[in-house]
Image (spheres, grey):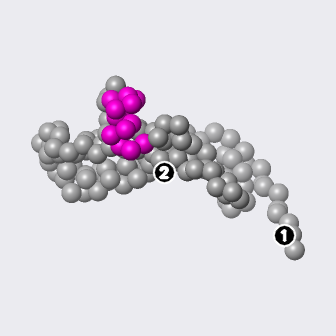
Amino acid sequence: LRCSHLISICMRRQQPETGKRLFPEHEEVAAVACAVQNMHLLATAMRIGSYWSSWFEHFTGSADGVAFNGLCLSEGDRWLGVFCIGASDRLGNYRATRMVVGSFASWYGVTSCKEGSQHDGEPSPKRQRKD
């Protein structure tokens, strides 16, 4: 990959507000990861090479790096890495292949996948509607 652009991957934490519940930090990190995955999928569809790198940790964890992105560590903001994009001669005619889940996963303790059954094959209790 000949990297032509670097995009900072940052998470700005939700701040407390009266009457509002805070999202757990791991959910906010997961939301950022989903956004990066969408960028990766788009780049691949456009035949552009890309990857999420955390090898810039010496910079992402520094006060200069945090200030560069306008983050506030005391409020829980985090710089999670760098998304590198650029031309690649390895993409070629890359095409993803899909496999049936049963070809690479084993399911233990499952007797059926019918609606209302749990992973151990026992039927789940019916939920009572509260009026």
Badge 2, how many Cα within 10 Å: few under 14, some, many 20+?
A: few
Residue 31's disc number: 2
Image quadrant where residue 109 sits? top right
Asked whether 68 falls inside the magenta stretch, the response is yes
Image quadrant where residue 49 sits? top left
Q: Can you say which quadrant of the picture contains the N terminus?
A: top left
Callouts 1 and 2 close, C-beta under 8 Å? no
Badge 1, how many Cα within 10 Å: few under 14, some, many 20+?
A: few
Disc 1 residue type (three-letter): Arg
Q: Residue at x 58, y 50 (%)?
A: 15
> Relative to residue 20, is residue 88 depicted above or below?
above
Image-based side of 59 in relation to 5, left or right: right
Image quadrant where residue 114 sits? bottom right
Residue 129's disc number: 1
**Pair 1/2: label in front:** 2
Q: Main secondary structure of the magenta part?
A: helix
Disc 2 residue type (three-letter): Ala
Asked whether 124 falls inside the magenta stretch, the response is no
> Could you tell me which secondary element the residue under label 1 belongs to?
loop
Q: Estimate the spatial distance between the alpha carbons at disc 1 and disc 2, rounded to whole Å.
A: 32 Å
Image-based side of 29 in relation to 24, left or right: left
Q: Which residue range is magenta in the image?
A: 59-71
> Relative to residue 129, is residue 47 depicted above or below?
above
Q: Can you say which quadrant of the picture contains the C terminus?
A: bottom right
Q: Nearer the viewer, residue 107 or 5?
A: 5
- Tag 2 or tag 1, which sits nearer the N-term? 2
> Could you tell me which secondary element the residue under label 2 belongs to?
helix
Q: Residue at x 36, y 54 (%)?
A: 38
